[in-house]
Image: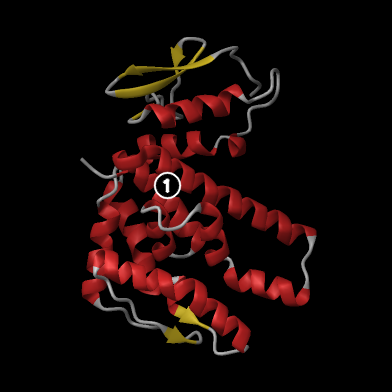
Amino acid sequence: MKRFYRDTAVDAGDGGFRVLLDGRPMRTPAKAVLVVPTETLAGAIAREWHDVPEKAEINVAHLPLTRLAATGLDRVTTQRERVIDDTAKYGASDLVCYRATDPASLVQRQQRLWQPLLDWLAERYGAQLVVGSGTTFVSQPAEALATLRKAVAAHGDLALSALYNLTHIAGSLVIALAVSEGRLAGGDAFEAAQLDELFQMERWGTDPLAIQRHDGIRHDLEAGARFLALLGDARLKG
């Protein structure tokens, strides 16, 4: 579909802020009015659509904020508990809890980047996760997992859309929660989530496909971080 509108704008309505295309409220794929709780987020979504070149094909990959908002409105609202469960379950096998045994430089890098996140998690939420070495499964305390599920459930529908996406891309609920709380920026989340792969690339080199893949991961993580930042305090439920 090519760009079919001339102007974009934002106005207050439907209990929040709507994005307008030629004066008409934008709608999600499920035909709901795309309304978000903050004017800053609505403005950023409008900017995504404004920046689509005239007569160009509309590529949803270039509209990450729009996609996250639409997913929150169309999908999270109708299956909220499932999304919470699918996000929270990553705490049981979180990336940052599995450490290499060698080489020493990788072990040190994991300790330097990942351990402060676990220390922050314990201080912020009172959830102490167990760290293991190698690939052997580590059983996490039920109390800690229940606490993390509550932290996930505290997010509103739109924020949960972004948190779910961040968690699945990073392979880490810890990293996603750190982004939501402003503990990690999007670029830092990428460095933490891709630590092992980046280490291997430094040692053995890379290729265009790997670079393209990493660019996509970084783009998605940074978009999720920006989305949550634009939601501000509205990211929390009720």
Query: Is residue 21 positioned above or below 123 on the image?
Result: above
Give residue 2's position: percent from left, percent from top: 66, 21
Q: How is the image coloured?
A: secondary structure
Q: How many marks?
A: 1
Depth order, front residue of 1/48: 48
Query: Is residue 119 positioned above or below 139 on the image?
Result: above
Give residue 236's position: percent from left, percent from top: 27, 45
Residue lying at the far top in this picture: please name it. Answer: 23
Q: Secondary structure at mark 1?
A: helix
The answer to whether residue 221 of the structure is visible from this angle is yes
Q: Determine the image quadrant of residue 50.
A: top right
Depth order, front residue of 210/127: 127
Residue hosting label 1: 162
Q: Quadrant of the N terminus?
A: top right
Badge 1: few (under 14), some or many (20 or more) residues near its Cα, within 10 Å? many
The answer to whether residue 77 of the structure is visible from this angle is no
Q: Quadrant of the C terminus?
A: top left
Query: Is residue 204 positioned above or below 54 on the image?
Result: below
Give residue 190's position: percent from left, percent from top: 56, 59
Residue at 36% of width from left, 54% of height from top?
181
Residue at 59% of width from left, 89% of height from top?
102
Depth order, front residue of 159/186: 186
Q: Amino acid at mark 1?
A: Ala
Q: Determine the image quadrant of residue 37.
A: top left
Residue at 44% of width from left, 62% of height from top?
175
Give residue 3's position: percent from left, percent from top: 63, 19
Residue at 35% of width from left, 30% of height from top?
38
Give the side of residue 54 with respect to residue 178, left or right.
right
Q: Determine the image quadrant of residue 229.
A: top left
